[in-house]
Amino acid sequence: MAFNYLLDHFWESVYYFQLQKTKNDNDAEDITIQTFSKAFDKIHSFDENFQFKTWLIAISKNVYIDFLRKNHSSISIETTVEKEAEVLDIVDNSPSPEDKIITEQNLAKLLLDIKQLKPKYQQVIHLRFFQELSYREISEKIEEPINNVKVKLLRAKKLLAEIIRKSS
């Protein structure tokens, strides 16, 4: 629940910060996902003497620099097995309010609502809820770190819940 709160309250700040830098919706969204992924992974290092938003923006700046480096070189950064193991220990399987709204929907209507999401969000929703893949399996399938998968799935569920609320 705490991660939901942080995502709800700080997503737009980080996203619009990155949109100004990248001038590209997809890149800004990807960098924002990576920012929250890193922040959730390093939440224990947050110093309460500073504002959380400032800390997030600092992480976001570093992710942006990594993004620029990655786009200017052919080197890709892989998540270590140890880091992935750490992430798996923090799995929260309790249904969120968004999960409850989603499961209450008629399947045909739900499929139409899912089609309103961006393709990358459609993909993680499909893999997780229709193919019932684990975070690790999704991570391998889309070739992204597990933390990114978790944040992307959390964001997809929030956007889908908003679509469902508006169309009800």
Image (tube, grey):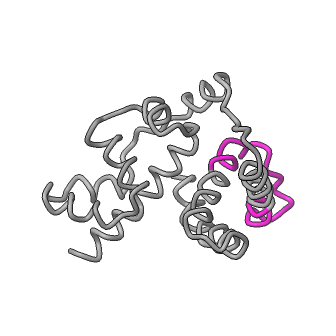
Question: Which residue is nearer to you in this view: 162 or 148?
Answer: 148
Residue 54 among magenta residues:
yes
Quarter of the picture holding the C terminus: bottom left
Quarter of the image holding residue 114? bottom left
Using the rendered view, name the quadrant where residue 45 is placed.
top right
Q: Is 38 drawn above or below residue 167 in the view shown?
A: above
| Residue under the image location 33 percent in, 52 percent down | 99
Residue shown at 55% from the left, 40% from the top: 144
Given residues 167 and 30, the one toward you in this image is 30
Check the image and report above or below for 37 versus 145: below
Which residue is rendered at x = 63% and y = 28% of the image? 86
Q: Nearer the viewer, residue 62 or 86?
A: 62
State which region is magenta: 37-57
Residue 61 lies, in percent from the top left, at 79, 60
- Picture coordinates of residue 125 (x, y %)? 35, 49
Identity of the residue drawn at 59% across and 57% down: 30
Question: Is residue 114 on the magenta stretch?
Answer: no
Q: Residue furthest right?
A: 49
Q: Position of residue 5 (x, y in %)?
A: 55, 60
Majority SS type along the magenta span: helix
Counting labels gives 0
Q: Is residue 147 left or right of residue 135?
A: right
User: Closest to the observer: 163 or 23?
Assistant: 23
